[in-house]
Amino acid sequence: MNTVRATTYTSANFILHGVIFLLLVFTLFDHFFELNYETSNLLNLLALAALGVMVLRYKQLLLYGLSFLIPLSLQMKVAGNSQISVPAEVICVLLTVFFSVKVLLGYKPDRKFLVHPITLLILLDLSWLLVTSCASEMPAVSFKRFIIRLIYYISFYYFYYELFKQDRKNIKRIFLLHVVGFLIPIGLVIYQQALMNFSMVGSQRTSAPFYFDHTIFGAGLVIFVPFLIHYSMHSNSLKQTLFYCGLVVIFLLSTWLSYSRAAWVSLGISIIFFSLVKLKIKTKHILMALTFGVIILILSGPKFSSYFADSKQLSHTNDVTMHLKSVSNVNTDASNKERINRWKSALRMFADKPLFGFGPGTYQFFYGPYQHRDELTRISTFSGNKGHAHSEYLNYLSETGLPGLLIFITLVFFIFYRGIRLIRTSDDPTTKDLSLFLTCGLLTFFIHAFFNGFLEFDKIAMPVLSSVAAITFLDLQTNSGTEITK
């Protein structure tokens, strides 16, 4: 039994979809239109009803729409200090409710999907998040974070897996829809940057209100660059080639204008990986090169430490070269010093609670006392309003203990193991190509995750988890012998 069925398109369906789309647009841009209270509430209720109809009858189209709307969704306040991304997270909540009701009524997902190593590790990750939420220092905060992660896994991993199982071409479709939706925030950034004469200073908020910070904007961009490069090289016509080449230029330019050093570095590493695969370098040779590189770094440790200590390059200056070199400045660059401050605080928190951590979502409320005075910067805070370990991995360590981090690292390992195995061993050229750009895109995120933590936001969770769903689908398809060679 499939929870996502193909939509049969009729004139009535097109009219219904058009009405729903207009309602969503009005709801999305309510923030800009400044509609009166009554009108706003009426449109919100109509949009919610329309979404309910789509969840029940047109889930395929709804998932397409979700891909397009993720980059355009806006944070809106709900009860208390809580916020919700509208309309993306509203759609995700409705999908989760639908799935939960189906399960309670006896629906069982495909067994092969459930016992796949990636799915099992995701279920283990959720289970440990639940356990650590029960042992949390702030249970209400932790259970909220657990529910958000559950909603993301159901919406972006399970439902997109079902969509891909329906038709493999949906992988390309949902990526392309997301890219097209992304063009509006990109246009806004370029416009605002132009007003500032493309100055790096003060550019950190030009991606607002769609992306709250230049770092998450950059992280979102680079995930899709491998996809666009792939189709610029494998299009069926000159028009398609020019279309994808134009998108590659736009996304690379926007990545540059994001002035996110982590995005630049992660994209560079992904391109190197892509090149090694295309050159058909053997896996063992890549591992030997990495081992040799690690040995060189260890032997050269004193020299690098001396260089880092002496480095005076500052980020957020108008000198792009200095901005990139500032990655090594842990002495005077406030951004780097604060990141290291957060990392050290996370490690000290782990030392106090190594098994269960402080609980999902609680880092920001407890890291303050773990800061050392001599490590504070001008952007340090004790107020709990800027709280993240600036590392997905260290955040896991401080909030869910060593078991949580090990589960997450194992999940990451299996994602890449299965992705690389598909690239290396699949007999289907299309599967190999899809696996390559999916793995390269995921590599940008998991490299970026050393420096930031964005998996708790829908704008990053969707492309990451849908990519993981695509790899799971391709792996199951390959192992079942149902690949379609084209």
Image (spheres, rainbow, N blue to C red):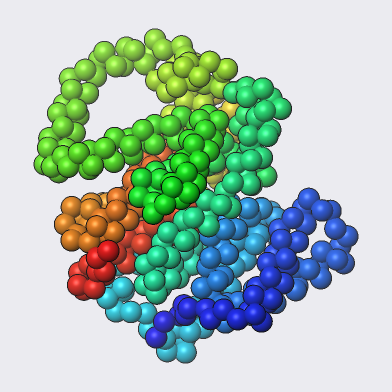
Nearer to us in this view, 329 or 189: 189
For the point 22% across and 23% down, which residue is it? 297
- x, y percentage for residue 261? 46, 29
Nearer to us in this view, 412 or 17: 17
- x, y percentage for residue 95? 54, 73
For the point 29% across and 79% down, which residue is it? 111
Quadrant (top left/top right/bottom left/bottom right) for the N terminus: bottom left
Judged left or right of residue 360, residue 418 is: left
- x, y percentage for residue 384? 59, 42
Nearer to us in this view, 32 or 406: 32
Q: Is residue 463 above or below residue 159?
A: above
Residue 386 seen in this snapshot: no
Judged left or right of residue 54, residue 434 is: left
Residue 261 seen in this snapshot: yes
Quadrant (top left/top right/bottom left/bottom right) for the C terminus: bottom left
Judged left or right of residue 459, residue 164 is: left
For the point 47% across and 80% down, which residue is it? 5
